[in-house]
Amino acid sequence: MELQHVNVKLYLENSRHVDLEALIPVFHNWIQDQICEELLIDVADYRHVHAGPGVVLIGHEADYSVDNTDSRLGIRYNRKAILVGSNQSRLKQPLRAALVACQRLESDPSLEGKIRFDRREIELFINDRLIAPNLEDTYTVLKPALEVFFQELFEGNGFSLRHNSNPRSLFSVAVKSTKPLDPESLLKKLSS
Amino acid sequence: MFDPFLAPEELLPTAQAIARVFARLGEKKNRNRARIKFLVHDLGIEKFRALVLEERQILPFDPRWTEYLKEVDHHQEQPLKPAGKLLETDLEGFQQWLETNVQSQKQEGYAVATVALPLGDITPYQLRALADIVRRFTKESVRTTVEQNFVIRWISQGDLPELYAALRAVGLGQPGAGNIVDIVACPGTDTCKLGISSSRGLAAELRSRLAEKSLELDESIRNLHIKISGCFNSCGQHHIADLGFYGVSRKVGGYTVPHFQIVLGGEWTHNAGSYGLPIVAIPSKHVPEVVIRLSERYISDRNKGENFQGFIKRIGKAEVKKMLEDLARVPDYQQDHSFYSDWGDPREYSIDDIGKGECAGEVVSAVEFGLAAAEREVFEAQVLLENGEIEKAGKTAYLSMIQAAKTLVRTEYLDVPDDSERVVSEFRTRFYDTQKFFDPFAGGIFANYLFAAHQRVRPHTQESAHHLIEEAQLFVDAAHSCYNRMGTMRSSLVKA
């Protein structure tokens, strides 16, 4: 199975204190400063939608958002453009992008340190039901590759995988680490 | 009207005959006129009808014209459950939702429920949940509405509390369907290439301000309709709203500032009984204040039983404009630069459009003055129309277009004479033939309004004067856009 359109969501710890409105100028600054290699285009505000996409930074290759799907706020990277390489590298790219986005938001002075992501959980989605229908079979096929990927990334720290088997949802797997993750070392590992 | 009654079996062959007449005689070269309405206008409805009926007679019979009629009855909606009676409930929020989102059906014991979607948005998760809910309470049928909501029919009235609870659980139980909070907006600058101002941004802002106090709002205000389009193309249906807005831009001190034209007098009821007319362009950031000011005045000064449209008609557009005059002014950039960005977008609005004139001391250019004068004339035409001076209203609307055209011509030919024949001729050569005046998407359509008005010899009727005033406003707006584009080109040349 060739993984494409991988989404990564990193949940926020203190979501009650997060003011999504404050993210709008931050995302606009990202566009103006061209902070990443992707082409960033515009900011869409969906705060009025119940358990919706929150505030979305629309890009050509990928969207970044502080997303509230399932009423759980998190930083979400939605890779839209096709990635070349192996499945392992197709997992690395979106995870790296999501972590960098988290670091940027955590350190943005205008957000006054109110954004902090949960360092124990990462959720992966495949936003393509044709590639990955949300079935047990899909999970059976992908599980070994995911285990290899996270064993290597977490350098021996314990973790668990949980497949969300609701067939109406996108295929997704929550990865829970037994110890808090260090974004710096994860990024170093992902860049190697 | 082509025909007040058409038998179902004649529907498809008549449509086919119309299509064939249009294919034969309709406009082929000018895309802006490639519409049946232009052909009907040119031929007259009588001749058009005769041609269609002639065509209908020679069409070879096709069994598909009537085959589908056998299936029509299968699509009739039927109830899933027997009629019921609504029992008392203390479910939180239910009463308010019931008042605004539910109407009794003609069939006793059944109701129609509206699912109000803020700004017409819904997630896939909510859509799936809605499908489940619809299957639970009806025979799998739900309709979309032109107000960007869903409607569910054939709800047994006894099921209403359960329906509400199910909708609320997935964030679809919002009250206020079809009232002042339920604002309709087109995509505007969010995603539409034609968008000039942020219609969704304004709608979100108005919605959040009004929702906060929706319960305290006077009932007469609560039922007003607000509709917003990001440009003149009316996708947000601004022309049939109590309070309609469409996006325009204006140059202020060399900067482009997002504005909305305030459209009043439109009628949502009686199957969109009448279209409103633009009163004045207001900077985007002042629009919420316009809504507050107009609604407060309506609450305090309306006569008993007077609707908003009647109220506006009674106090007169001149008075309305006077009320809003201070809000039409844009503070200097140095004084308050928030006016120079649009709702939901903190970036400065088209800052690259700065286009200063040759004189270093110029703050308001002669073009801005000229176009403002044209706009005043359009408004004057409205007031004349309101006072029943139809011919004069038409003439004034036409002169406003001449004024706007002359203003643009003067950017190239300062001493252009006032003679309208000469203005139109110079405008045609310098701005139409060169396509400088062409809208990037609508092409030369607005210039054609001027040419048609210039050639007009027939006296005006109420309807034709109303129509010409609308066209004059669009022509003046297009002149503003043309001037903005000229500024952008100048800036690019200077940078290069």
Image: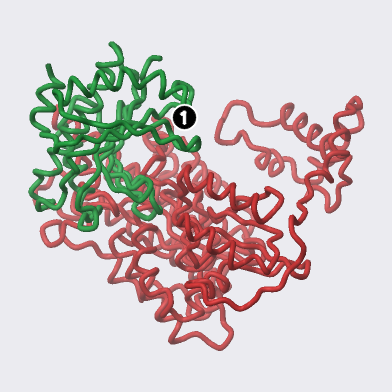
What residue is shown at x 46% (from left), y 35% (from top)? B443
Picture coordinates of residue B456, whole percent (x, y)? 59, 50
Q: Residue at the location (44% across, 39% down)?
A: B425
Q: Amino acid at mark 1?
A: Asn
> What color is chain B drawn in?
red
x and y percentages locating residue B412 in the rendered image: 28, 39
For residue A12, side relative to residue B375 (left or right): left
Question: Which of the 4 image quadrants contains residue A164?
Answer: top left
| Viewer-proximal residue among A99 and B382 | A99
Q: Which residue is mark 1?
A: A134
Q: Position of residue B328 (x, y in %)?
A: 30, 65
Q: Which chain is green?
A: A
Q: Is residue B203 above or below residue B6?
A: below
Rate crowding at label 1 as few (under 14), some (14 to 19) or many (20 or more) other CA atoms within 10 Å. many
Q: Give me the chain letter of mark 1.
A: A
User: Which quadrant, please, contains the C terminus of chain B?
Assistant: top left
User: Which residue is at the front of the view, B83 or A153?
Assistant: A153
